[in-house]
Image (cartoon, grey):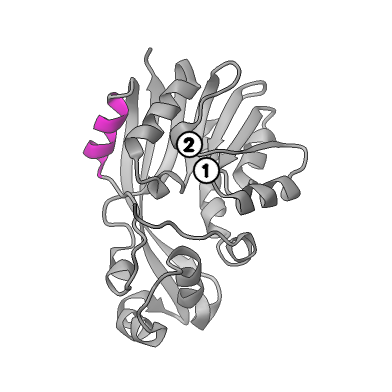
């Protein structure tokens, strides 16, 4: 099985707040309503779960990283967070009105199992709102690294077909480029690699030299992010 990143909540919160800051727009798409039961799948350190809860919705945040869940509970002690692998997750009570996921599903190497769990978690007519890496995401950065970590970055057609196999009807799906500024100035790329590709075996000086002509602009590093945003609903 391909490796995943080893999450360091302090580094994640200190240098990569763009993950949940960009996700704030996705919460607007979700449009949570008071009293709705919403699952935040891959909640990280809890910032978007808190934004959803501010609407009056009842939120459960799940994540497979013990460190991230611990930080989420520390950040937002009044909210509910559970250590859980989405591939195996099943709700213990009534199904959810919505499942929300931002920048998490591309870390799951068994997307079929993830889609099955999402479908099982939703009530009939419930909605799924997600954003994840799309095909071509961070291609420029990835080609410069020596790493065993892999992500699942699908096309619209591939992912729509996957969801449909699990009774999730796709209502909208778009792919868009999002060049993303990395915090830290000159050290920004190094910090990104340390967080998301910590097993990189290529000398960092070589990586920076190769990427500087394409990803260094105005004294800042930018990552070549490309995102897939999907809205779907549970049919059965």
- The disc placed on residue 102 is none
The answer to whether residue 125 is above or below residue 220 is above
Q: Does the magenta stretch include residue 215?
A: no
Is the Cβ of the residue at disc 1 closer than 8 Å to that at disc 2?
A: yes
Identify the residue shown where x is 67% and y is 34%.
Answer: 53
The answer to whether residue 165 is above or below residue 131 is above
Circle 2 residue: 86
Circle 1 residue: 42
Spot occupied by residue 76 in the image (x, y as percentages of width and height): 74, 44
Q: Quadrant of residue 199?
A: bottom left
The stretch of residues the image draws in magenta is 155-164
The CA distance from mark 1 to mark 2 is 8 Å
Residue lying furthest right: 78
Spot occupied by residue 46 in the image (x, y as percentages of width and height): 64, 46
Which numbered disc flags the more N-terminal residue, 1 or 2?
1
The answer to whether residue 195 is above or below residue 3 is below
Label 2: few (<14), some (14–19) or many (≥20) C-alpha neighbours in 10 Å: many
Secondary structure mostly seen in magenta is: helix
Identify the residue shown where x is 44% and y is 75%.
Answer: 221
Q: What element carries label 2?
A: helix
Q: What element carries label 1?
A: loop
Residue 144 visible in the picture? yes
Foreground mark, 1 or 2, reads: 2
- Is 207 on the left-hand or right-hand side of 97? left
Residue lying furthest front: 1
Identify the residue shown where x is 72% and y is 45%.
Answer: 73
Say which quadrant the C terminus sits in. top left
């Amino acid at each position: 099985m391909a490796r995943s990143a080893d999450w360091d909540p302090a580094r994640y919160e200190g240098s990569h707040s763009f993950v949940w800051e960009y996700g704030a727009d996705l919460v607007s798409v979700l449009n949570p309503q008071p009293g709705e039961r919403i699952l935040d799948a891959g909640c990280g350190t809890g910032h978007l779960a808190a934004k959803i809860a501010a609407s009056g919705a009842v939120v459960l945040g799940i994540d497979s990283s013990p460190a991230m869940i611990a930080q989420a509970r520390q950040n937002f002690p009044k909210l509910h967070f559970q250590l859980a692998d989405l591939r195996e997750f099943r709700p213990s009570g009534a199904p959810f009105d919505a499942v929300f996921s931002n920048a998490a599903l591309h870390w799951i190497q068994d997307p079929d199992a993830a889609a099955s769990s999402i479908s099982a978690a939703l009530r009939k007519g419930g909605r799924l709102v997600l954003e994840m890496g799309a095909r071509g995401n961070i291609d420029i950065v990835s080609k410069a690294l020596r790493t065993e970590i892999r992500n699942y970055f699908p096309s619209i057609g591939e992912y729509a077909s996957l969801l449909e196999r699990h009774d999730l009807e796709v209502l909208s799906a778009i792919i868009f480029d999002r060049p993303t500024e990395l915090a830290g100035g000159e050290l920004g790329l190094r910090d990104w690699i340390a967080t998301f590709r910590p097993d990189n075996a290529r000398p960092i000086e070589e990586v920076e030299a190769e990427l500087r002509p394409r990803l260094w602009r105005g004294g800042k590093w930018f990552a070549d992010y490309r995102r897939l945003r999907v809205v779907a609903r549970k049919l059965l």
